Image (spheres, coloured by chain):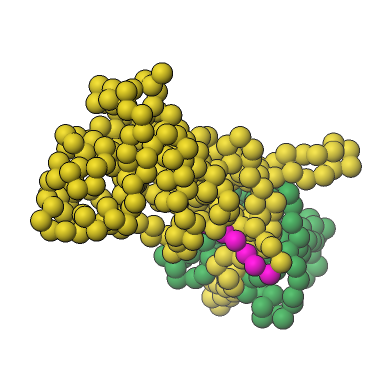
Amino acid sequence: MKKASQILTASAVSLIFLIFAIASSSSKRVVADTKYNGVFKLSPEKDETVKNSGKLEFLKNATNPTIVLRVPNASREVLEEDKNVKTAKNNDGSNNLNDINVYNVIEKELLKGGFTVRDRALFEKVLGDKSVNDYSRIKELTETDLILELSTIQYVKYPMNSFTFFSQSKRKGNIESRINCTNYFNIYGLKLEFRLIKVKENDFIGSFTYNYTPCTDYPCNYKINVSSNNACSSPFIEQGNVIFSETRLIPQSEIEKFVKSAAQKMVNEVFKNRE
Amino acid sequence: MKLSSKYHLLFFIAGISLLAGYFNYLLFQPDIILFNFLVVQADAFTIRNNFIRQFFTGYFSDIAWCLALCCIAFAFAKLKYIRFSGKIQLLLLPFITEAMQHFQIIKGTFDWFDILTYAIIITVFILLFPSLKTYNYEKS
């Protein structure tokens, strides 16, 4: 009898404590309960330039070399080798790259740099003609020295799993603290790539890759939600009732500035040998 | 049966531990099933320090729960309310609970640090109260 009572007591205590354990488990999986003013800092991504300087020598003597900008969505089936060129598309949902006139910005910089810029639309029409299947024929028809192809313009993810924030303390003043998240979130940058083709000789003479890494010189201040178990949301900015996050954290003006600066750098690189 | 003050103290520690765990959940994790059931609504209190916040949200209540269990197991064993096997059963309960969480038999998050914490508490308890280990159980 006593034995049964002892077993019953142990089982009852076990059951009560098991109920306590179950009752203390979270009713929700992730609770975003704390909003922080996070400070985010990234290291800049390096630009990459590959060029055949010898093939660019002709620019030394050319007064106004002619160039045309070829855009990613242009007809790609005119030349056999173009089938290997991958068109970078933005698959991140909110494609605000189309909202700015990237191509006009680039053409303007080419013009400022001393190029004679050929009409893009006319060039596309020539490319659309199936009988034109050779670059030298394109040169004949369009009188263009160089084709500048905007082969890539896309968003790039920079994964992060920590951020810093500042809090005020009466005794110590501004205190910097760091939160390590249990998950990764992304800060978005941009990548722009030009390919330069010398039309007359069918030669690919340069590749210019430029990166826009946000939060490098000046750290970014974004809001971020952190749950009780340190799961972090995507960083965001609140403007009234509108929330901007992910790719929309890069303002249109910043994209335009980056495209402009990349085009300027590319022009400077091409004309480096020029007196 | 009149209990000595030693047992009163053990039951008191067990009660206080459970109460501390309860208030800890109320302050830092008010989204638990118990409060849903009791219809208690509260905003979570935020601690800015990463380490302290993780301790209170992740470990404090577990430690309190395990401490209460050890006190009850010790007191009941001394009072002969439970047998040796019952005591083992109670002391293994924290690990069984974690295992059940791991296999998703009950809700909750399995954590190796919880296992380590329970092991430390039970070991310390046995070292502090050697009589729990060496207690002679009479044959029945």
**Residue A51: image x %, image y %?**
30, 28
Q: Residue furthest top?
A: A275
> Measuring 25% from the left and 32% from the top, which residue is drawn there?
A205
Highlighted range, magenta: A241-246
> Which corner quadrant holds the N terminus of chain B?
bottom right
Magenta span contains residue A62: no
Where residue B37 appears, x then y in whole percent? 66, 80
Chain coloured yellow in this rendering: A
Task: Place residue A2 in its image quadrant.
Answer: bottom right
Q: Residue at x 33, y 47 (%)?
A: A118
**Residue B93, image x, y percentages:** 53, 62
* Residue A244 forms part of the magenta stretch: yes
Look at the image and tell me whether residue B99 can be seen. no
Residue at 76% over, 60% down: B45
Q: Nearer the viewer, residue B21 or B42?
A: B42
Q: Colour of chain B?
A: green
